[in-house]
Image (spheres, rainbow, N blue to C red):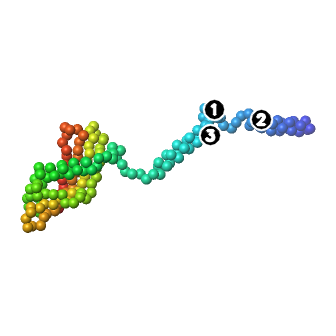
Amino acid sequence: MTNYINFAWIALVALIIGGFAGHGLFPREIVNEADKTTIKDLNAQNADLATKLANAQKPATPVNPTVVEVDNRQKLLDNAVKEYFAEVDDEDLLDCDHTEYSLSELSQKGVIKSYSITRDISRRDSTDTVNFEIEVKFDDSSDERPCYRTDDVEVTFHSKPSEDTEITINSQK
């Protein structure tokens, strides 16, 4: 019986030693040397993620990617106003309160109330679109009071000289 007990003790000690040796020699997971990342790599990845997070937290502005800021705003606005007066004369839009006036009796009353200018570069040629609201005065130098009218105007200038300037006028009263 002592032989069996001695054999049991030897087997138990061999199992314990084998367990420790096996654990040390064979790791639990296989690590590929090519997949190891260094601390520098992790810092670079964290910096990229921090930049992306900072950009994501900026308030989003709804911007059409093909619309850009226009540099010569005042020049475009002045040209659009000239186109407006030419169009009013050409299209017989010289009436106010059912009275017909001539172009010499028409004048701009004050400054333009509001305007916006956009440049669209999505097409083959770029276009500058000027939207503005203008109040005009009709005065025939008579004893009657002058007539005032407010127009919403959209003028589109094309970069190609072959294309005509487009103008849309909506009178409000």
Label 2 crowding class (10 Å Cα cut-off): few <14, some 14-19, many 20+?
few
Q: How far apart are labels 3 and 2 at the CA level? A: 31 Å
Q: How far apart are labels 1 and 2 at the CA level? A: 23 Å
**Is there CB contact under 8 Å for labels 3 and 1?**
no
| Residue visible at 28% across and 52% down in the picture | 116
- Relative vertical location of residue 119 with respect to residue 37 in this rendering, above or below: below
In this view of the protein, can residue 168 be seen by the observer? no
Horizontally, residue 114 falls left or right of residue 1, namely left
Q: How far apart are labels 3 and 1 at the CA level? A: 15 Å
| Residue visible at 84% across and 38% down in the picture | 13
Element type where label 1 sits in the image: helix
Element type where label 2 sits in the image: helix
In this view of the protein, can residue 31 be seen by the observer? yes
The amino acid sitting under disc 1 is: Glu
Residue 46 percent across, percent down from the top left: 56, 44
Element type where label 3 sits in the image: helix
The amino acid sitting under disc 2 is: Ala
Disc 3: which residue: 39
Q: Quadrant of the N terminus?
A: top right
The answer to which of marks 3 and 1 sits earlier in the sequence is 1
Label 1 crowding class (10 Å Cα cut-off): few <14, some 14-19, many 20+?
few
Between 137 and 127, the one nearer to me in the picture: 137
The amino acid sitting under disc 3 is: Ile
Q: Quadrant of the C terminus?
A: bottom left
Residue 30 percent across, percent down from the top left: 65, 35
Horizontally, residue 5 falls left or right of residue 173, namely right
Between 64 and 152, the one nearer to me in the picture: 152
Disc 1: which residue: 33
Disc 2: which residue: 21
| Residue visible at 49% across and 49% down in the picture | 54
